[in-house]
Amino acid sequence: MSLAIDVVKRSGKRPTESFDLDKLLRSVLAACLSVRTPEGEANDTARKVTGAVVIWLDTKPAVTSHDIRRITSTHLSRFHPEAAYFYQHHKHII
Amino acid sequence: MGNFDTASSFAIILLAALTHASFQLSISVLTLLSGHALGRKTAHLRLLRLSGGFMLGAGVMTILMVSFVAYLLQMLLPATTPAIIWAAYSGGVIGVGVSVWLFYWRREPGTTLWIPRSFARHLADRAKATKNSAETFGLGLTSIIGELLFTFAPIAISALVLIRLSPEEQLLGILLYAGVSLLPLLVVGLLIGGGHKLSDIQRWREANKRFLQFVAGGGLIILGVFVYVQQVVVTAMSVTGGYQ
């Protein structure tokens, strides 16, 4: 599902893309599963987090991918701190 | 074989391997690889196969690297290694040790290593895309190459010591080096296979990264000083009659 919101990529070199809710849901779900959360709980957490992000996006015509990541991390920290840690840090492992 | 008896040769190989074991690139790649595999709902047995393939690749490349450098040195050096070579090696190892203290981690959160960013991105992309054990084997090979900037020092000093041993002892030395240097990778692989959370493993690594850096750099400096004293200073004193 795509909302009519443009996402500006982090480096600014790649073209903008439409916000993809399924992509966000998959990334949060993957973070939850990576820390061995049971599948049902992981799905539930992913839905709650993406729901909160969609509310935040409601009034914005364009956002950066960095902002989406930051807000998602904030909400994920409330619902699942372990998954939030992995979500925030997986780009800083290597 | 200069001033080294077999016991001190194996002690040097052991110290070099322990220093090598404190380097973290392979562990980072294994953590990332397992994270992506778990995130894709990979079955447990398949996860074990992927980790096993990665560790096997890292082990094979470590053995190949030590054997290759030892073979090269055996071809290039005379029967008795000149003191100047030992001095140059010791200086190089101490230099790498100081560099590890100064540069090993990047000044940013997480466990980001001081390796070329394009190479780190390549490893991260491959860890995400890899789905079978043959690919993880290749990734294991590559991760050892990626850290050669730092691991070349312990590999080279072990190779220099190895070529003065008998063929049977050489084989034992290579296996000892590979076994010890891969121990942390094996431990992390077992922890992941045993069901531990990746977030706990990564938190521990992040909390102790400065200690690991200190151990790796300090180990190299001690190794360099020991080899210099044993092979250059003691040999010079023996020749001039100052040490009997």
Image: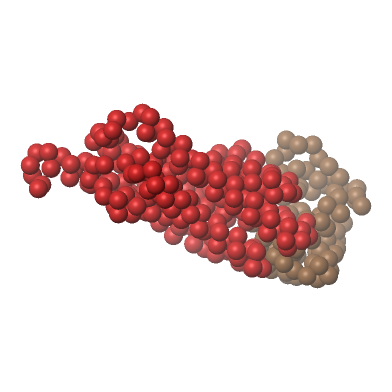
Q: Nearer the viewer, residue B25 or B175?
A: B175
Q: How many discs mark residues in the rendered view?
A: 0
Q: Nearer the viewer, residue B38 or B46?
A: B46
| Vertical placement of residue B240 versus A53, above or below | above
Examine the image and state in which quarter residue B231 appears. top left
Q: Is residue A62 left or right of residue A80?
A: right
Examine the image and state in which quarter residue A87 appears. bottom right
Q: Nearer the viewer, residue A81 or B177?
A: B177
| Res A49 seen here | yes
Q: How was this image coloured?
A: by chain
How far across and down, in percent of the image, does residue B86 sit? Answer: 28, 38
How far across and down, in percent of the image, does residue B217 sit? Answer: 39, 51
Q: For the point 10% across and 47% down, which residue is it? A: B243
Chain B, hue in figure = red
| Res A92 seen here | no
Q: Which chain is brown?
A: A
Q: For the point 76% across and 58% down, which residue is it? A: B42
Residue that extends furthest to the left in the rendered view of this protein? B241
Q: Is residue A39 left or right of residue B114?
A: right
Which quarter of the rendering shows the N terminus of chain B? top left
How far across and down, in percent of the image, does residue B203 sit? Answer: 58, 64
Q: Is residue B43 left or right of residue B150?
A: right
Q: For the point 50% across and 45% down, which residue is it? A: B62
How far across and down, in percent of the image, does residue B176 sit? Answer: 43, 53
